[in-house]
Amino acid sequence: MISYDYHCDANGETLTVSHSIKETLTTWGDLCSLANHRMGETPPFAPVRRLIVCEESKPDDSELSMFSKSKTSGGGCGCC
């Protein structure tokens, strides 16, 4: 499953949950239920929106070996 960040403008909270790519949460109540988070005083029907999160991470050795090509004289593009 993929992790998604959802933000509720009504209370300013952002929660991270995992769910199917086909699913989209639209209310604070649905988000709290999936995240097992206390709703507090925010109405359960308050809208939430999914955020786009870009995280840059350093790949580990296994990821590097998947994408790296061996350098050969004259055959490479010279970008690596």
Image: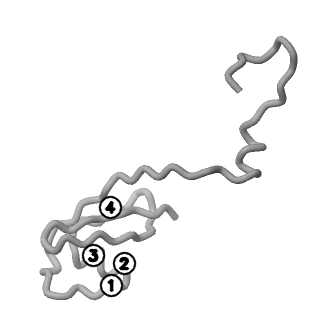
Describe the element under mark 3 as helix, strand or loop.
Answer: helix
Whichever of labels 4 and 2 marks the residue nearer the N terminus, that label is 4
Within 10 Å of disc 3 (Cα), the crowding (few <14, some 14-19, many 20+) is: some
Label 4: how many Cα within 10 Å (few below 14, some 14–19, many 20+) = some
Q: Which residue is drawn at the image coordinates 47% and 52% (left, top)?
A: 55
Q: Nearer the viewer, residue 6 or 71?
A: 71
**Mark drawn on residue 30:** 3
Q: Amino acid at mark 3?
A: Asp
Amino acid under disc 1: His
Mark 1 — residue? Answer: 37
The amino acid sitting under disc 4 is Thr
Q: What whole-number distance in Å separates the C-alpha atoms at marks 4 and 1?
A: 17 Å
Residue 62 versus residue 39 in the image, above or below: above
Circles 4 and 3: CB atoms closer than 8 Å: no
Label 4, label 3: how many angstroms apart (C-alpha)?
Answer: 10 Å
Q: Are marks 3 and 2 in contact (CB under 8 Å)?
A: yes
Q: Which residue is mark 4?
A: 24
For the view shown, which residue lies furthest in the right direction? 73
Going from N to C along the chain, the mark reached first, 4 or 3, is 4
In the structure shown, which secondary structural element does the residue marked by tag 4 occupy? loop
Give the numbered dot on residue 34: 2
Label 1: state its secondary structure.
Answer: loop
Cα distance between the residues tagged 3 and 1: 10 Å
